[in-house]
Amino acid sequence: MLPNVVMKDKYSIDEFANLIGKSKDTLRRWDNSGKLSAFREPMSNYRYYKSEQLAIFQDTLLASENQNATTIAPNGNYNVLELFAGAGGLAIGMEKAGLKCAALNEIDHWAAETLRQNRPNWNVVEGDIRKLSFRHLAGKVDVVTGGFPCQAFSYAGKRFGFEDARGTLFYEFARIVKEVNPPICIGENVRGLLSHDSGKTLQSMIAILDELGYRVLEPRVLKAVNFNVPQKRERLILVGVRKDIDVDFEYPRPFKRIFNLVDALKKGDLFDCDVPDSPGTKYPVSKKRILDLIPPGGYWRDLPLDLQKEYMQKSFYLGGGKTGMARRISWNEPSLTLTCSPAQKQTERCHPDETRPFTIREYARIQTFPDDWQFAGPVSAQYKQIGNAVPVNLAKEIGLSIVSFLNKIKADKNLLISA
């Protein structure tokens, strides 16, 4: 009997992919090549898998119960070029996974200064990506990563190709992927990209990478809370594998344990000491008066009715729970997604015991930055850097998946260009 699997006679492609930790794209390729053939309904040609096929992956499923304890070591010097690097959340995770930083680009001065101060040996290229070229790194980089901002495309009369994307920052990401031509590229963005312009923006991005010679896996939303991050943050991951490489990339498998706010701010399994003291912003007097009345784990609906109406104003009469408004986080739950400005209305994340926003170091802990990672600039700039970051522990798991992928290439076909 397989662990934690409710046995069925048939599984859809989506169900089977989730159970074995593969993408639907991988299953389709296995089906086409005969490696693992799907069954088909005779009339509709609907594809499905049978329960006995799960036995093939029994060892994989059992291993996932072991809290992903296996550490993957790189079989060479694998180099990363990171675009839109921010304050280094993704870069630190890549470093923890064993990848080497070839260069990082960031336009924001304080974020670039944060990178330079913490890692003087990193090649930090501060400036507008639209004015930069990385052709000198062609043949020297194994992966290009980047959290490109989501921008709309203009569709009128367009074929949604590479040249049509000019003027968007995704075009710059794709342009540099074309210049460097790495075996794999990884883009990350907010979950909302899935539905942006009814999904057309994401489909255009996929079409552009396909045009540049990359096989794009089905995008995956990774929940940070499943990867040792005490925060309900979601990131959309877009993976492109160069078409001449017949090796599967596997998304990281989620951990069983969920960490809560107490794990972030107190000594325990995530950190070996309580959170250090640090500066932080304060609530206006009027907001503090309201939040003083909110219990840990509560939000605006825990206020007396007259105060609900006063605080929410027109929003009180609109639909939806709006559970992030006037929200005090409990010690025994993960934090809601951190934002760039901790005191703004609609995104309050109040400390469980004190009526105040989280401090800089508390913010950093929730994003799983190490305590020795210092942020440059005024407090407002520091909050912005942390709020925009990819959680470090999530980035590490993505990095380990990249290392596993690159190891397979090196072992199977020796296709790597930089190791």
Image (cartoon, grey):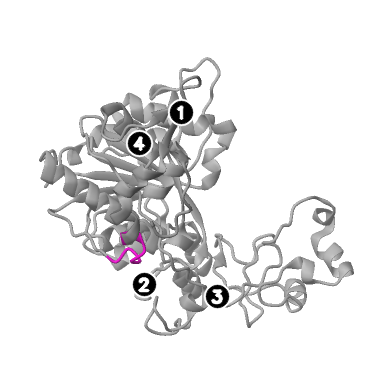
**Which label number is shown at residue 280?**
3
**Which label number is shown at residue 27?**
4
Residue sticking out furthest to the right? 306
Q: Nearer the viewer, residue 393 or 314?
A: 393
Q: Classify residue 16 as left or right of residue 286.
A: left
Residue 397 spot, x, y in % from top left: 33, 58
Q: Nearer the viewer, mark 2 or mark 4?
A: 4
Chain-order first, disc 1 or disc 3: 1
Chain-order first, disc 1 or disc 4: 4
Q: Nearer the viewer, mark 1 or mark 3?
A: 1
- What residue appears at the point 51 percent right and 32 percent down from the top-left corner? 201
Residue 96 sits in quarter: bottom left
Residues packed near mark 1 inside 10 Å, few (<14), some (14 to 19) or many (20 plus): many
Residues packed near mark 3 inside 10 Å, few (<14), some (14 to 19) or many (20 plus): some
Q: Secondary structure at mark 1?
A: helix
Circle 2 sits on which residue? Answer: 370
Residue 393 sits in quarter: bottom left
Q: Which is the main secondary structure of the residues drawn in magenta? A: loop
Residue type of the residue flagged with mark 4: Leu
Distance of label 2 from label 1 (alpha carbons): 37 Å
**Which label number is shown at residue 12?**
none
- What residue appears at the point 23 percent right and 47 percent down from the top-left corner? 405
Q: Secondary structure at mark 3?
A: loop
Circle 1 sits on which residue? Answer: 204
Distance of label 1 from label 3 (alpha carbons): 41 Å
Residue type of the residue flagged with mark 2: Pro
Image quadrant in which the N terminus is located: bottom left
Q: Secondary structure at mark 4?
A: helix
Where does the magenta region start and end?
Answer: 63-69
